[in-house]
Image: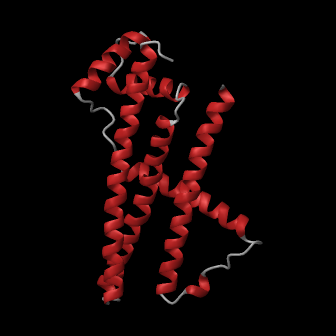
Amino acid sequence: MEDKILSKFSFYDNIGYLLVGSISLLVLALDLFLLNLSKLIPSFDVQSIVLWLITAYFLGHIFQAIANIVIKENKTEFSDEDKELLDEAKTYFGLKKSSYGQIYNYCYMLASVKDITGQVQSFNAYYSLYRGWTIVFLLESIFLVILNLLKWRNDSWIILFLTSIIITILLFKRLKRFYIYSRVKTLQTFVILRKGVL
């Protein structure tokens, strides 16, 4: 069972890092092209694919680290219904003095181990993926607004800036949604386990 859990975490995490890093490389390549610096973009071919994958993976980690600083979820705020379930979880785990946030973490770990449908892990993976992409496009938006203010001020760059802002907002809304989905599925899984269904 331990191998199954570790492989599930590794798969979701590693694919997420690669996807975030890959999009960041594409955005960077577009910026270099638009700045007439496309000669700085290394060639992409069979021989260089391993280097590109390593770079994308590394950048994925960097953008996720930035996301950890910039995007803060309130992990201690719960609805009244959630608090009722977490009070039951306190008794279930025998941790009466723990905070709701700590009890939720126990529920999450239990749900991750018993996540037969894969929903808890997949929603959490999507949440992480959208966090990374949000940071990529947020930084791109900042870069484009600086270019527009300092140098370019042409219609193409303004359109790119507005597009980047819209993408950032859409991705941010998606990450919020998947954060909620992950929380709901975690507590639902706990209820199912508590009732002895699994």
Residue drawn 66% across the image and 27% down it: 2
Return the x and y of residue 136 as percentages of the image width and height.
44, 63
Q: Image check: 2 left or right of 24?
A: right
Instruction: Give percent across and percent down for residue 195.
Output: 42, 13
Q: Is residue 151 visible?
A: no
Q: Residue 167 occupies which quadrant of the picture?
A: bottom left
The N terminus - image quarter:
top right
Name above or below for residue 92 compared with residue 45: above
Q: Is residue 177 visible?
A: yes
The picture places residue 149, in percent across and down from the top left corner, at: 29, 83
Q: Which residue is drawn at 42% across and 29% down?
A: 186
Nearer the observer, 158 or 59: 158
Q: In this view, does 53 lie above or below 176?
A: below
Above or below, comparing residue 9 to residue 104 in the picture: below
Image quadrant of residue 45? Answer: bottom right
Tell me: 119 left or right of 162: right
Residue at x 54%, y 52% (from the top left corner): 16
Kindly give the residue lying farthest to the right in the view shown. Answer: 47
Q: Position of residue 173 (x, y in %)?
A: 32, 53
Q: Is residue 30 above or below residue 74?
A: below
Say which of 136 and 194 sits in front. 194
